[in-house]
């Protein structure tokens, strides 16, 4: 199993999820409401406050940044490893 490739794919998925969450925090709130509704009664009455949406947007930005950092780290590590083997 190529773990380097898996880490790169995981980083790309984190970037994608972070961007979607940052740009559309309302979708994340709807998904959370739907998931909570599976286990609790009257979840339909829940309403996301603006502060929750801001926090969700901030989480999305952080997740995208972490994904970018992870991808860059893996890319630099791969380049360093290929430079070591070329010599």
Image: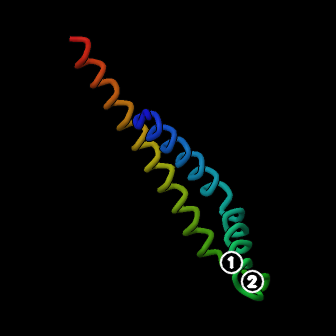
Q: Quadrant of the N terminus?
A: top left
Crowd tier of the residue under label 1, counting other residues whose Cα lies within 10 Å: few below 14, some 14–19, many 20 or above: some
Residue found 58% across the figure and 68% down from its top: 54
Residue 55's mark? none
Q: How far is the residue under mark 1 from the one under mark 2?
A: 7 Å
Q: Please report contact status of discs 1 and 2: CB closer than 8 Å, yes or no.
A: yes
**Mark 2, secondary structure of its residue:** helix
Query: Image check: 32 left or right of 86?
Result: right
Residue 66, compared with residue 71, is above or below; it is: below
Rendering colour mode: rainbow
Residue at numbered disc 2 = 43
Q: Residue furthest top?
A: 87
Residue found 73% across the figure and 83% down from its top: 46
The residue nearer to you, when weighing 5 against 75, is 5
Residue 46, compared with residue 63, is above or below; it is: below
Q: Position of residue 42 (x, y in %)?
A: 77, 88
Query: Image check: 77 left or right of 65?
Result: left
Q: Quadrant of the C terminus?
A: top left
Q: Position of residue 68 (x, y in %)?
A: 45, 42
Residue found 34% across the figure and 27% down from its top: 78
Q: Quadrant of residue 80?
A: top left
């Amino acid at each position: 199993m190529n773990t380097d490739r898996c880490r790169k794919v995981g980083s790309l998925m984190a970037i994608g999820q972070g961007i979607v969450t940052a740009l559309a925090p309302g979708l994340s709130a709807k998904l959370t409401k739907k998931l909570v509704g599976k286990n609790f009664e009257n979840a339909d009455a829940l309403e996301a406050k603006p502060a929750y949406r801001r926090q969700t947007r901030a989480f999305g930005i952080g997740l995208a940044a972490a994904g970018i950092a992870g991808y860059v780290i893996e890319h630099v590590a791969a380049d360093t490893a290929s430079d070591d083997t070329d010599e």
